[in-house]
Amino acid sequence: MLRWARAWRVPRGTLGASSPRCSVVPVAFSSRSGQGNADPRPLPLSYTLLDGEETLPAVVFLHGLFGSKTNFNSIAKAMVKRTGRRVLMVDARNHGTSPHSPDASYEAMSQDLQGLLPQLGLVPCVLVGHSMGGKTAMLLALQRPDIVDRLVAVDISPVGATPGSYLGNFIAAMKAVHIPEKVPHSQARKLADEQLTSLVKDPGIRQFLLTNLVEVNGRFSWRLNLDTLAQHLDKILTFPELRESYRGPTLFLLGGNSRYVQPSHHPEIRRLFPQAQIQTVPNAGHWVHSDKPQDFMDAVCSFLA
């Protein structure tokens, strides 16, 4: 089915305004993955752009697996206020209100951004990517260094397989959820939460997954393209092998309580990103920006300065 996703552009100085200017772009939304061969053309991603100083490179936030651009709402507004820069938040393909596609590769996600960023006049920009979004950001910087002014990879590395065997259980749990038609949204969330509990033990993670539960014409479904994500999960948990390096300023910002990036990854990080700084945020897990938002902001703003 076809839905309409709003791509908001909030005028400078009007954060929190009730009537922002917006552009509307059509995006295909379906609970089922497409069929056939992958289409190499970029998809029209759904995005939110907050206005700021146009002479400074914009900051572009890229979310992780199962996330959406709304994950960075508070951080993005604080970033505009603190740095004066334009800030873009993007829904990756198969996530949020962006189109679905049978191709979930990092190459395809990089191509989507190569189409969007010049279109919005945001080249070069500062890429800040978390987890899956961090891998997309790294690949884009390696493929098109002319597009990237600086790079921040949040709790992720370009090395081998990312820990994530449990993610398949999350997808299976979401696919197994059944909600009767025409129940109130609050009841639907409660029913989905109860059904997720057997495979998703952490209440915080369940609430995160439930942000993807949407109602369309009285029926509830997941806005994530679960079939494609399940099919390509192994590739999402790895990183393409590349020889070229990105020589721009780079920050790897890690959660002190996370095990996603190991000391053994550092040599490959240094090879691909010779100017990389590696910084740890104490007492933060994998979702550094959520666990320690102030420390996250301080680290990124210091890197930009």
Image (cartoon, grey):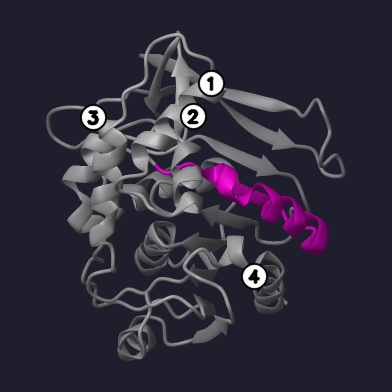
Left of 81 or right of it: where is 246? left
Residue 185's tag is: 1
Q: Position of residue 236 (x, y in %)?
A: 26, 56
* Nearer-N-terminus badge (4/1): 1
User: Height in image: 274 above or below 164?
Assistant: below
Alpha-carbon span between mark 2 and mark 3: 23 Å
Q: Position of residue 104 (x, y in %)?
A: 26, 45
Q: Position of residue 19 (x, y in %)?
A: 80, 25
Determine whether label 1 and label 2 are within 8 Å by CB: yes
Residue 106's tag is: none
Amino acid type at circle 4 is Phe
Identify residue for label 2.
189
* Nearer-N-terminus badge (3/1): 3
Quarter of the image for the C terminus: give it: bottom right
Identify residue for label 4.
296
Residue 33's tag is: 3
Residue drawn at point x = 54 percent, y = 79 percent: 249
Closest to the observer, 210 or 68: 210
Alpha-carbon span between mark 1 and mark 2: 6 Å
Q: Quadrant location of residue 95?
A: top left
Amino acid type at circle 2 is Arg
Residue drawn at point x = 31 percent, y = 23 percent: 178
Label 1's element? helix
